[in-house]
């Protein structure tokens, strides 16, 4: 880049022209200006427009959309578990992952879209599309899919997902803040569904969040107010139809939330950190009940207890478990800890360590909801899993669905090779029971045998087969 200053001199006397040119090399200044502009408007990590630049662009984009009455949708993307990436692999890998994620998002949407890094692990895409056009173009699915591909950074292969919320102009708001707020709210709902999902903003979402806040409030006082209790569902031995193993399931009862399921309040307690005292309540009371049963008769019962992903992250968990088991004088192999397949995959370095510690305490490990995640049997071998629980969604479809029936046969056979015990979950019908017996499944649970019962009923539980 050069700056050219020219002076022309015209002489009246001899009619001659003289020009004087001075050329100055200004590439450094231009470069500096460019740098200042980029630094002010672009994010260094992802090289995408930053929040500041985005706000200005978005506002003018909405102004012109309003004038020509064209549709706009706002796609708010938040990476799931990004904090875990930073904590586990360090910030430079975290930054590289963000850069790659930003690049993939840009590739997944059409070129005219405005893509920005909104902050932390949040990205926003503004599309010149209506909600219907967005659905048709599968933009949200494409973003989810591209982010679900493993990230290969240095020697690591990192699996990630994202939660997406979508709002539309002008139906969900006419101002940038309203639209971003609505998309953010919808994103929060997608995250609450467990992530790797997208949601469109709905008018009642704010109320649903309000309801969640209320639930959080009553959960907080739930332990002192004695609102939590445990029920026990028999797990039946299919070879002799006896039942000496029970799954411990948590219940919460409150006048405002009479039948709220743990599938609803446990994920909430996870996001608020309340899972720690609740998880401790479950372990302490499960062992207390087992201890009481031991005192009534012979010590033949064992329990499986559900653990949530957050409990696996909790440094104090194994110590607490050990202390309670010693306190109640229960031999540890009678306690089986259930971990869902998905939570096992989420953080496998830390999980490997925790599972090893649980094993040192002497407890057994079961994989819950097997088949719903992405692990494989060979992968499970690495974690030295004792028990595998096939998710009820597969059991529901046997024996009619041939593919699921084959899958279950395969799981049973391979598990046997690996010395892993198989439990079928959610058995409701005689035909399912017959199928499982015929194919050599070890154990099963479900309404067909018995619903979960109160501790007092454990002795008298009648197994229907
Ligand atoms: P899960 O561990 O897979 O538990 C099985 C769920 O299926 C239980 O629901 C049980 O009541 C239900 N169920 C049992 N048999 C049948 C059947 O034949 N048909 C059908 N449709 N359902 C059946 P519940 O008690 O509502 O628990 C839901 C989930 O909440 C559990 O799924 C577990 O992931 C979680 N959960 C429950 N208690 C605890 C707990 O103490 N701690 C943690 N972290 N999670 C818990
Ligand atoms: Mg379970
Ligand atoms: Mg399950």
Image (tube, grey):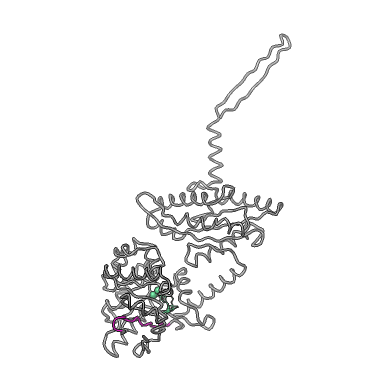
Q: Is residue 404 magenta?
A: no
Is residue 330 shown to the viewer in this render?
yes
Q: How many marks?
A: 0
Which residue extends farthest top? 14
Q: Nearer the viewer, residue 113 or 242?
A: 242
* Left or right of 379, for residue 164: right
Where residue 339 appears, as percent x and y from the top left, is 36, 70
Q: Quadrant of the N terminus?
A: top right
* Left or right of 117, for residue 334: left
Q: For the stretch drawn in magenta, what is the main secondary structure?
A: strand
Where residue 75 appears, as percent x and y from the top left, is 56, 57
Q: Nearer the viewer, residue 313 or 25?
A: 313
Position above or below: 225 against 175: below
Position above or below: 247 against 310: below
Is residue 277 shown to the viewer in this render?
no
Where residue 165 appears, as percent x and y from the top left, is 55, 61
Q: Nearer the viewer, residue 138 or 46?
A: 138
Q: Quadrant of the C terminus?
A: bottom left
Where residue 393 appears, as percent x and y from the top left, is 43, 72
Task: Ligand 1: give its quadrant.
Answer: bottom left
Point out the stretch of residues depicted in magenta. 229-240
Q: Quadrant of residue 398?
A: bottom left
Q: Is residue 233 magenta?
A: yes
């Amino acid at each position: 880049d050069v700056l050219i200053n020219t002076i022309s001199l015209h002489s009246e006397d001899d009619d001659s022209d003289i020009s004087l040119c001075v050329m100055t090399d200004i590439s450094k200044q231009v470069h500096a200006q460019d740098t200042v502009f980029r630094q002010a408007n672009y994010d260094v990590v992802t090289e995408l427009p930053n929040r500041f630049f985005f706000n200005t662009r978005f506002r003018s984009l909405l102004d012109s959309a309003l004038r020509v009455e064209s549709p706009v949708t706002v796609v708010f993307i938040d990476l799931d578990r990004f904090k875990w990436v930073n904590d586990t692999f360090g910030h430079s890998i975290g930054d590289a992952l963000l850069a790659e994620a930003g690049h993939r998002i840009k590739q997944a949407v059409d070129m005219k879209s405005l893509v920005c890094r909104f902050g932390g692990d949040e990205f926003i895409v503004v599309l010149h599309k209506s909600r219907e056009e967005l659905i048709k173009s599968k933009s949200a699915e494409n973003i989810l899919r591209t982010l679900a591909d493993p990230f290969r950074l240095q020697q690591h292969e990192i699996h990630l997902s994202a939660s997406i919320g979508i709002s539309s102009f002008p139906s969900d708001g006419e101002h940038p803040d309203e639209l971003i707020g609505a998309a953010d709210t919808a994103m929060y709902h997608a995250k609450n569904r467990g992530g790797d999902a997208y949601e469109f903003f709905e008018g009642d979402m704010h109320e649903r969040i309000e309801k969640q806040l209320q639930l959080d409030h009553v959960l907080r006082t739930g332990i002192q107010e004695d609102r939590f209790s445990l029920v026990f569902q028999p797990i039946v031995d299919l070879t002799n139809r006896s039942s000496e193993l029970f799954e411990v399931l948590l219940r919460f009862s409150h006048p405002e939330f009479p039948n709220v399921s743990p599938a609803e309040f446990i994920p909430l307690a996870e996001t608020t950190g309340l899972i720690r005292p609740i998880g401790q309540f479950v372990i302490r009371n499960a062992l207390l009940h087992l201890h009481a049963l031991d005192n009534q008769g012979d010590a033949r019962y064992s329990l499986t207890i559900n653990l949530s992903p957050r409990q696996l992250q909790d440094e104090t968990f194994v110590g607490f478990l050990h202390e309670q088991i010693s306190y109640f004088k229960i031999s540890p192999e009678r306690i089986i800890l259930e971990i869902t397949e998905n939570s096992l995959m989420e953080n496998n370095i830390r999980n490997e360590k925790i599972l090893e510690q649980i094993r040192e305490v002497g407890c057994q490990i079961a994989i819950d909801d097997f088949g719903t995640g992405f692990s494989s049997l060979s992968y499970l071998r690495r974690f030295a899993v004792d028990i595998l629980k096939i998710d009820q969604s597969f059991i529901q479809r046997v024996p009619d669905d041939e593919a699921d029936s084959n899958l279950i046969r395969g799981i049973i056979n391979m598990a046997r090779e690996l010395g892993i015990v198989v439990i079928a979950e959610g058995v409701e019908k005689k035909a399912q029971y017959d199928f499982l017996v015929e194919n050599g499944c070890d154990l099963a649970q479900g309404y067909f045998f018995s619903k979960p019962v109160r501790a007092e009923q454990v002795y008298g539980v009648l197994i229907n087969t």
